[in-house]
Every structure is written in C-alpha cells, then in structure tokens.
Amino acid sequence: MDAVRGSPLGTLFRPDNMINQNAGAGNNWAKGHYTEGAEMIDQVLDAARKEAENTSCLQGFQVCQSIGGGTGSGMGTLLVSKIREEYPDRMLYTYTVIPSPKVSDTVVEPYNAVLSMHQLVENVDATYVLDNEAMYDICYNTLKLPQPTYGDLNHLISAAMCGVTCSIRFPGQLNCDLRKLAVNLIPFPRLHFFMPGFSPLTSRATQSYRKLSVSDLTQQTFDAKNMLCAADPRHGKYLSCSVIYRGAELSTKEIDLEIAGMIDKNSHFFVEWIPNNCKTSICDIAPRGLKMSSTMTGNTTSMQELWSRLTDQFAAMFKRKAFLHWYTGEGMDEMEFTEAESNLN
C-alpha cells in the first residue's frame, strides 16, 4: 500500500479508498473468504458504495485479483458475491491472474484456484484470464526485456484493460461497452472466461522499423504467442471474439475486410454454428505514444486446458486430504471442496 501511495500514480487514489489490514490471509482461501476477509468486507463495500453513488450512470465494476493466494482468491470472491447481491443489474468483470503451469508460488494454489473458480462461474458476468508465465514469455520473446519486472507485467495488463474500456471513455465510430461485449461474446452463461490479446507489441530496437497497419495489428492480435494467458488458441475453436481498434484515421471498411479475410483463412478455428462471431469496435483516440492499437477478447474452447490442469492438481492433493486441516480449521467443510471440483468439471 505504501508503495502505491509513494508511486507517481499515488495521487490518483483517494486516501479513504485505500483499505488495508495488518493480518494477511496466509495463502488460505478460507481465511480470506470466511474469517480475515469477512471482518473488513463491510468497510470495502462502503467505499465502493460511496463511489457508485457519485456516478451518474454506473456501467459496472471491474475487480482485479489473483486466485493463487489467499486474499485475492478468498476475499476477492467474497467481494464479488457481495457486489452481485448489492448491484444485481450492473455488469461485473474480473481480471483474474491464475496460477502458472510451470511456476508455483505456493503448494495450496490448486485449492485456492478451484474454490475461487467455483464462485467466479456463478457470480461474475465475465472474467479475463491472465497468467504471469504467459506475460513473462511476451516480455522475454517479443519485447526482448532481459529481466522483466512485475511493473512490466502490469503494464501489459493495463494496456489490455484500457483497450477493453476505451469506448466508454473516448469518442469513436463504432462504440462498445461492457454490456455489449458480454452480449456478443457469451453464448452460454457459464462460458464467460475470456482470453485477452493486445498489439502492437514490439521491442524498442525494432520499433522504428515497423509501420503499423490494420493488417499488421490484426495478425499480431490473433497470434498465439501474444495471448496474456497460457492456453493456446490453436488447440481449440473460437466461440466468439471481439477486436477493439484504436486510432485516429481507421477505416471501418478496411477493418471489416481484414477481419472477414482473417476468418475466411482460418475458418477451422471458428465454430460454424455461430455465424459472424467476430465483433469489431473502433475508438478514435489511440493510446499514448502509439498511432494505433488493437485489443482482442476471445472466448475459446482452448480455455479447457487451464481448467483441466487445475482440477488434476486439485484432485491429486484432495484425494490424500493434503493440507485440508488449514481450511477446515477456519470453519470450512469438505463438501465445499467436492462441490467446487464438480462445478469446474
């Protein structure tokens, strides 16, 4: 918290809205959801309510969380369920960092992640799935950064977040908001887990040699190496996708032709029972420092790779009841684990 307050962006946050407590959740979902988190949830909801009352037309909420630890997963899902109770008719989006395939911070990540997913399936309108490892790969291989920091990863996430919400904040030819995105991207209520992609991503050395064009942006946006989560879109099919272009002199016709051509060439990666399943939006204001950019939101069946990996890790530990006493000691029941696992399957 002090690092945020002391950073150049610290002045953007109202001091009253920075709520913290000395005790952590100790990588325990039950602590974040039932004990430590429950103690301060009213304070958090009160701050959210004050901000919501200041708005003239509240579009929805965006929650940023990680589901490998205890606070982001346990308290994050508690916050999500309380917001859903309090504002049932507003959009609720989450940007969720899931445990990476190869790098594990804590042993109980699979428990925390599966218990959180159970809540996200039920209470959230849409979830953008992010993955530290996939973003490290982008920093190493595409941006050619020798030692990426969390700041670099956050920069990638913020670029994708800004791209998704830019139509709400800036004028454009073809606008899109959180509700439109959800209507166009979610064919069935439970299938609301999206894969984000962003372009242009170029290393500093090659930036001056690259001329941005709609074709170039589209190609890089759909490139499997540019996805911010560790699922490979080539291993499944797109149910639907949305591409938001930003730039001053973009032609709607050129964009439509480019997308149509791309879908035509790669038709085997798109399900045939949803025609015209790629939505495009255009915003006139480009991001700072770029002439144009594009943000892709994909709803693809390859996300099952992530869920099957999590459930396999979860099952391996749960059948031996490993580390379970930390959760039951905080008042949880074994049945909750079984329910969460069956909901994800």
Image (cartoon, helix red, strand yellow):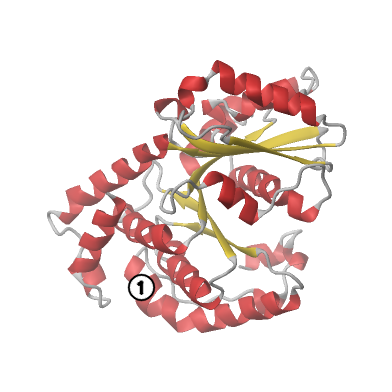
Horizontal side of 90 relative to 132 (left or right) equals right
Q: Is residue 101 something one can see in this rendering? A: no
Q: Nearer the viewer, residue 145 or 208?
A: 208
Horizontal side of 331 relative to 65 (left or right) equals left
Residue 344: image location, x then y, percent: 30, 52
Identified at 29% across, 56% down, the residue is 343
What quarter of the picture does the N terminus occupy?
bottom right
Horizontal side of 122 relative to 309 (left or right) equals right
Residue furthest right in the image? 249
Residue 255 occupies quadrant: top right
Residue 253 occupies quadrant: top right
Identified at 65% across, 45% down, the residue is 155
Q: What is the number of callouts on the image?
A: 1
Q: Is residue 316 something one can see in this rendering? A: yes
Residue 266 versus residue 194 in the image, above or below? above
Q: Nearer the viewer, residue 303 or 27?
A: 303
Residue 232: image location, x then y, percent: 44, 30
Judge the density around disc 1: few (<14), some (14-19), many (≥20) Cα neighbours within 10 Å: many
Q: Which residue is the site of mark 1?
A: 31
Residue 51: image location, x then y, percent: 69, 76
Residue 161 versus residue 332 in the image, above or below? above
Residue 225: image location, x then y, percent: 53, 27
Q: Amino acid at mark 1?
A: Lys
Which secondary structure lies at badge 1? helix
